Amino acid sequence: MARASLGYSPPPLSYFRHVSHLHNYTRLAASSAFHVSSAADPMAHPSLETLGGARDLFLPALSSLTRPYNPFPVIGSNRHVETIFASFYRSTPDVRLRRECLRTTDDGAVSLDWVSRDDRLLPPDSPLLILLPGLTGGSDDSYVRHMLVRARSKGWRVVVFNSRGCGGSPVTTPQFYSASFLGDMREVVAHVGNRYPKANLYAVGWSLGANILVRYLGQESHACRLSGAVSLCNPFNLVIADEDFRKGFNIVYDKALASALSKIFKKHALLFEDMGGDFNIPLAANAKSVREFDDGLTRVSFGFKSVDDYYSNSSSSNSIKDVCIPLLCIQAGNDPIAPNRGIPREDIKDNPNCMLIVTPKGGHLGWVAGPEAPFGAPWTDPVVMDFLQHLERGKSGALSSSNSESEQPRLEGLHQLEV
């Protein structure tokens, strides 16, 4: 979820700075008191739920999981406070990016934001990480920037995939992106893979971006070009997520996201003039909920009979069983937008490539905990990086020999627009 107006003024920043100063006095003592020493076969701390067919394989590489999950005082005590705080007050690292506008085979366009000058500074075989932001999100979002900076500090090449209309990405056809559409993802992976054929490819997705990523992994199955992936705050079951989205305080998020979607739509409304069929353009332009926007535009664009049909057939919970590469899923047990009850635990347990971590707190895209809390990177970032580096260490030796035996295929029909 991108930062959006929630319809009221959040507390001043000075209030949270006061809480932060108080917490600093107790952080060191608490960390020492609860630290659990790593062993040859470490166990995750009881405050964390860990499971999956690949749990025992990946857990030894994630040493930070032996320590308790300690949510930041006050901010982490309520899932809505944490979600809103992270959206409005988390720092946003300053990074100079270079934009590439990629024309897709249907004449659409997506924007790829690369770290400026990395094409000259990094070796061609540097591991490459694709970042997929959440609904209406882009490369300016704080959680995306923090992950980008951390990966880049480890020598990784990073690119942010801004979907159609998001993060300032152009809309050139009467079609946005959706939870069901994987065409752009396939083209982006093929494009960056062909540009850097010596590099191992990885991806991290948040919220709707995570849902799209996991669906892509399942559909590609054994043919997937990625060497590993991480899913964060994934709604998984969109039918369940939609049910909870229309309850209680969640309505605030629903209205904020609907407003953001309608704003993007209105910028490109001329592309949708005189659209026939079941399109309801006024409903999409003035949507008061994500469901209304999807009913007026999204589900019609992608050929679904109803919103429920769209949500049911676009849920990544259906794809877990077909994932054939290493996948780490991290969820917050109290996430108001990605419900705990929607996590496909049994399928994750049955898949030898998957591992799930569920924190007791965290909100949605929050995770205000760990040494950088409250204004720094989310608690999840070090865990994600440990996982990815573990995979890269295992893959890097095999890449050079495989490249000498076969050439990477080229994708036809892709054209670049210079911006």
Image: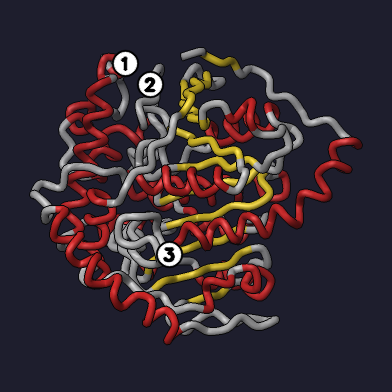
Residue 235 in sight in this render:
no
Mark 2 or mark 1, which is nearer the start of the sequence? 2
Q: Decide: marks 2, 3 in contact (CB < 8 A)?
A: no
Q: Decide: marks 1, 2 in contact (CB < 8 A)?
A: yes
Mark 1 or mark 3, which is nearer the start of the sequence? 1
**Relative to 33, is 107 above or below?**
above
- Residue that appears at 52% across and 21% down: 102
Q: Where is residue 168 in the image (x, y as percent from the top left)?
A: 35, 26
Q: Which of 98 and 218 is in front in this view?
A: 98
- The residue labelled by disc 1 is 271
Q: In this view, does 19 lie to the left or right of 109?
A: left
Q: Nearer the viewer, residue 300 or 268?
A: 268
Q: In this view, does 352 lie to the left or right of 63?
A: right
Residue 71: give its label: none
Q: Position of residue 61 (x, y in %)?
A: 64, 68
- The residue labelled by disc 3 is 331
- The residue labelled by disc 2 is 171
Q: Position of residue 90 (x, y in %)?
A: 29, 51
What is the distance, in whole Å, between disc 2 and disc 3 at their CAs?
31 Å
- Residue that appears at 62% across and 72% down: 59
Using a 10 Å C-alpha cutoff, classify the residue at mark 1 as few (fewer than 14 neighbours), some (14 to 19) or many (20 or more): some
Instruction: Determine the image quadrant of residue 138.
Output: top left
Q: What residue type is labelled 2?
A: Val
What is the distance, in whole Å, between disc 3 and disc 1 at their CAs?
37 Å
What is the distance, in whole Å, between disc 1 and disc 2 at their CAs?
9 Å
Q: Nearer the viewer, residue 163 or 40?
A: 40
Q: Which amino acid does label 3 sit on?
A: Gln
Element under disc 2: loop
Instruction: Determine the image quadrant of residue 377.
Output: bottom left
Mark 3 or mark 2, which is nearer the start of the sequence? 2
